[in-house]
Image (spheres, rainbow, N blue to C red):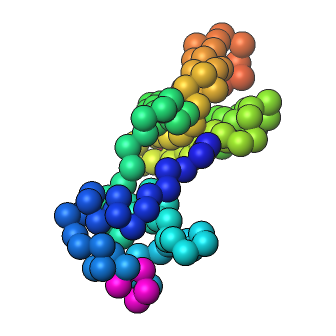
């Protein structure tokens, strides 16, 4: 993507300053500029850094990210470990390495509660949540949520 470049005069107009003031900022190093021939050019990002502004995206937005927190009650330590391993293994396989899923699990032994935090791409997060739903609702004995309060 090509970045906008401004002349000293354009920057002076934008900032409502005198041209000599802008040149002084460039010479003192306060405003970064590139010298092309006998003229200075200031990039839009350098101008934004100088003024303390951030550029707003005028093109397409960046990739979306989803934050999900799921609470599962009635989970003992062994089941929490199995679920955590399943979630981490699933998050680390078959997804875009440039946009990895991040998964963290926290088990509360006293309350027999597991929290699963998932951060990542919406489609990959949905896939992981579907897997978790299938495991939690399956009657195949992979995950037995009966907790003994001994």
Q: Residue furthest front?
A: 38
Name the side, left or right, on which 93 lies relative to 24.
right
- Of residues 20 and 110, the one nearer the viewer is 20
- Of residues 124 and 29, the one nearer the viewer is 29
- Of residues 136 and 98, the one nearer the viewer is 98
Residue 63 appears at what percent x and percent y? 55, 33
The residue drawn where x is 70% and y is 18% is: 141
The residue drawn where x is 74% and y is 34% is: 96
102, above or below 147, in the image: below
141, above or below 50, in the image: above
Name the side, left or right, on which 68 lies relative to 89.
left
Q: Residue furthest right?
A: 94
The residue drawn where x is 52% and y is 36% is: 62
Residue 69 appears at what percent x and percent y? 44, 35
Residue 48 appears at what percent x and percent y? 38, 61
Q: Main secondary structure of the magenta part?
A: helix
Name the side, left or right, on which 97 lies relative to 9.
right
Residue 139 visible, this orientation: yes
The residue drawn where x is 50% and y is 71% is: 40
7, above or below 111, in the image: below
Q: Quadrant of residue 23?
A: bottom left
Name the side, left or right, on which 50 lies relative to 109.
left
Question: Which contiguous range is marked in magenta?
Answer: 24-28
Quarter of the image where the N terminus is located? top right
């Amino acid at each position: 993507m090509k970045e906008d470049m401004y002349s000293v005069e354009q920057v002076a107009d934008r900032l409502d300053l005198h041209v000599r003031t802008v040149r002084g900022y460039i010479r003192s190093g306060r405003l970064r500029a590139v010298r092309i021939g006998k003229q200075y050019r200031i990039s839009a990002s350098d101008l934004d850094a100088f003024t303390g502004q951030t550029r707003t995206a005028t093109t397409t937005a960046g990739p979306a990210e989803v934050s999900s927190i799921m609470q599962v009650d009635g989970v003992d330590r062994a089941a929490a470990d199995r679920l955590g391993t399943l979630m981490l293994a699933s998050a680390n396989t078959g997804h875009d390495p440039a946009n990895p899923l991040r998964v963290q699990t926290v088990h509360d032994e006293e309350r027999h509660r597991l929290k699963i935090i998932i951060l990542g791409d919406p489609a990959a997060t949905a896939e992981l949540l579907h897997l978790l739903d299938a495991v939690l609702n399956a009657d195949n004995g992979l995950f037995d949520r009966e907790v003994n309060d001994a």
